[in-house]
Image (tube, rainbow, N blue to C red):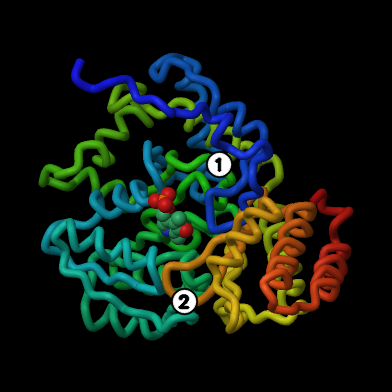
C-alpha cells in the first residue's frame, strides 16, 4: 500500500456545530423530522414495500403538480439533473428551442438545450422583471420553436414569472412543448400542470418541497410522453433516459439502484404537503413571505424586485451601501446561527420562504438576526420597528393557521 492511512480526520461531531444552523437561505431548507427519519432508512429497491411507496409517490406528485395523467419519474440527482432529464428527452438535436432567460437558473436550461445540439434562441428578460406574454408570443411567431423553457421562480434574482400560465397557453397554440422549472416554487404557490398545459415540470427536493437535496422529480404530460416514445434516435444520456427510468417507475423493474432513502424522504415530504393541502400551504407561504417583507421594509431596507414581479418563495433584499454582504452573512451565521444566501449577480442577499422556512418562530429569529447583524456592522436599522411589523402582519392569522 503506497497511500498511507490519512490522519487528522475528524468525526462529524467535531466538525458540525452542536446545534444545527437555521437554514434560511435559497436552499437547502430545514426538513421536517419525518423527512429526516425517512432519509435514514434503507430498504430493497425492487421489493413490494418499495413498489407500494413508489405508487404513493406518483399519486401524491400528481396532486402536487395538479395533473390527472402526467408521467411522474424520480431522478437520483439535484434539481439540475431533473432539468437535464426534461431537456434531453424533449429536445431533439437540430431542433429549435426558445429559452426565456430571467437569470442564472433559466439560463442553465438554455445551456442544457445547447449541449443537446438544439438551436437555442434566448429571450433575455431585463433583471427584476417577469417575462411578458406578448413579447414571448412575438418570439414564438418569429422563431417557431419546438420547445420553450421557462422558470416559474428565478431563485437567483428573486423574480417570479407571473404570466407563466398565459405563456404556456400561447406556446400550446403554436404546438410548442413547454418545460417549466418549478424547483423553488412547487408547493409554495399556485401551479397547475394540466390546466396551464405544461409538458414537463421539474422540481428538486431541497427547496419548495422541504426535503433533502439529491432527489428530484419530473412530470411529463401525455403529449410529452408520446413525443418521448416516438423518438427514433438513441439518447446520449443513459441515466437520464426517461424510457429507461420508466422501467423502474412504471414497470417494477431495474434501471439503476434507486436512491431508496431519498425516495422515502420525498414520500414523507409529499405526504406532509398532502395533509396540509395545497391551498393552506400556498396561503401559509404567501402570508409568511409578505410578513417578512413588511418587517424588512419597516427596518429601513429595500426589496430588490417590484411587487408585480416579486417572488415570494425567495425574498431578495438590496444591500445598502457600506455593508458587504459577506460580512452580513458571516455575522448572522457566527453570532446568531442563522444562514441566509448571498447572490450570484445583483448586490442582494436572499432569505428563503420555502416549506419549513415559513414558520413564525423561524421568521422572528431570522429577522432579528438580520437586523441585529446590520446594527453590529454599523448600519443602524430600526430593528424594533421591523419586528413589530412582522408581529402585526403574522398576528392576523397566526393562531388560526397553525404556524
Ligand atoms: C436551486 C434551483 C435549481 C437547481 O437545483 P440544484 O439542486 O442545485 O441542481 C434549478 N432551478 C431553480 C429555480 C432553483 O432554485
Q: Is mark 2 on a helix, strand or loop?
A: loop
Q: Quadrant of the N terminus?
A: top left
Q: How far apart are marks 1 and 2 (CA)?
A: 28 Å
379 relative position to 398: left or right: left
320 relative position to 205: left or right: right
Q: Mark 1 points at which residue?
A: 211
Q: Does the residue labelled 2 lie within 8 Å of ligand 1?
A: no
> Quarter of the image holding residue 235?
top left
What label does residue 346 carry, if any? 2
Residue 242, position as x, y percentages in the image: 28, 40
Residue 299, position as x, y percentages in the image: 76, 77
Residue 46, position as x, y percentages in the image: 39, 17
> Quarter of the image holding residue 397?
bottom right
Q: Nearer the viewer, residue 55 or 5?
A: 5
Q: Residue at x 79, y 51 (%)?
A: 403
Q: Which residue is drawn at 69% across and 71% down?
A: 374
Q: Nearer the viewer, residue 372 or 142?
A: 372
Amino acid at each position: 500500500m503506497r497511500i498511507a492511512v490519512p490522519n487528522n480526520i475528524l468525526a462529524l461531531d467535531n466538525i458540525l456545530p452542536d446545534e444545527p444552523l437555521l437554514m434560511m437561505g435559497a436552499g437547502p431548507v430545514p426538513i421536517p423530522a419525518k423527512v429526516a427519519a425517512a432519509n435514514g432508512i434503507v430498504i430493497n429497491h425492487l421489493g413490494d414495500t418499495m413498489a407500494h411507496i413508489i405508487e404513493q409517490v406518483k399519486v401524491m406528485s400528481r396532486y402536487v403538480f395538479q395533473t390527472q395523467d402526467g408521467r411522474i419519474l424520480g431522478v437520483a440527482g439535484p434539481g439540475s439533473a431533473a432539468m437535464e432529464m426534461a431537456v434531453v428527452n424533449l429536445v431533439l438535436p437540430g431542433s429549435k428551442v426558445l429559452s426565456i432567460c430571467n437569470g442564472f437558473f433559466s439560463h442553465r436550461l438554455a445551456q442544457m438545450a445547447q449541449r443537446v445540439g438544439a438551436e437555442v434562441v434566448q429571450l433575455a428578460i431585463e433583471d427584476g422583471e417577469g417575462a411578458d406574454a406578448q413579447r414571448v408570443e412575438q418570439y414564438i411567431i418569429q422563431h417557431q420553436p419546438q420547445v420553450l423553457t421557462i422558470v416559474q421562480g428565478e431563485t437567483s434574482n428573486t423574480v417570479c414569472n407571473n404570466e407563466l400560465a398565459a405563456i404556456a397557453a400561447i406556446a400550446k397554440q403554436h404546438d410548442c412543448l413547454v418545460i417549466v422549472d418549478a424547483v423553488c416554487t412547487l408547493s409554495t404557490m399556485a401551479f397547475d400542470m394540466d390546466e396551464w398545459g405544461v409538458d414537463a415540470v421539474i422540481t428538486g427536493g431541497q427547496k419548495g418541497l422541504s426535503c433533502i437535496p439529491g432527489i428530484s422529480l419530473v412530470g411529463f404530460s401525455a403529449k410529452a410522453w408520446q413525443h418521448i416514445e416516438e423518438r427514433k434516435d438513441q439518447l446520449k444520456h443513459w441515466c437520464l433516459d426517461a424510457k429507461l427510468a420508466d422501467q423502474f417507475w412504471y414497470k417494477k423493474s431495474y434501471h439503476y439502484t434507486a436512491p431508496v432513502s431519498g425516495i422515502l424522504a420525498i414520500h414523507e415530504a409529499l405526504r406532509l404537503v398532502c395533509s396540509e393541502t395545497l391551498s393552506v400551504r400556498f396561503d401559509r407561504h404567501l402570508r409568511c413571505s409578505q410578513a417578512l417583507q413588511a418587517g424588512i421594509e419597516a427596518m429601513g431596507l429595500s426589496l430588490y424586485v417590484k411587487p408585480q414581479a416579486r417572488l415570494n418563495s425567495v425574498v431578495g433584499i438590496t444591500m445598502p451601501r457600506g455593508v458587504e454582504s459577506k460580512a452580513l452573512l458571516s455575522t448572522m451565521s457566527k453570532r446568531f446561527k442563522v444562514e441566509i444566501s448571498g447572490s450570484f449577480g445583483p448586490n442582494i442577499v436572499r432569505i428563503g420562504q420555502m416549506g419549513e422556512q415559513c414558520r413564525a418562530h423561524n421568521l422572528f429569529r431570522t429577522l432579528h438576526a438580520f437586523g441585529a447583524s446590520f446594527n453590529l456592522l454599523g448600519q443602524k436599522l430600526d430593528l424594533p420597528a421591523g419586528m413589530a411589523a412582522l408581529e402585526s402582519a403574522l398576528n392576523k392569522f397566526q393562531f388560526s393557521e397553525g404556524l
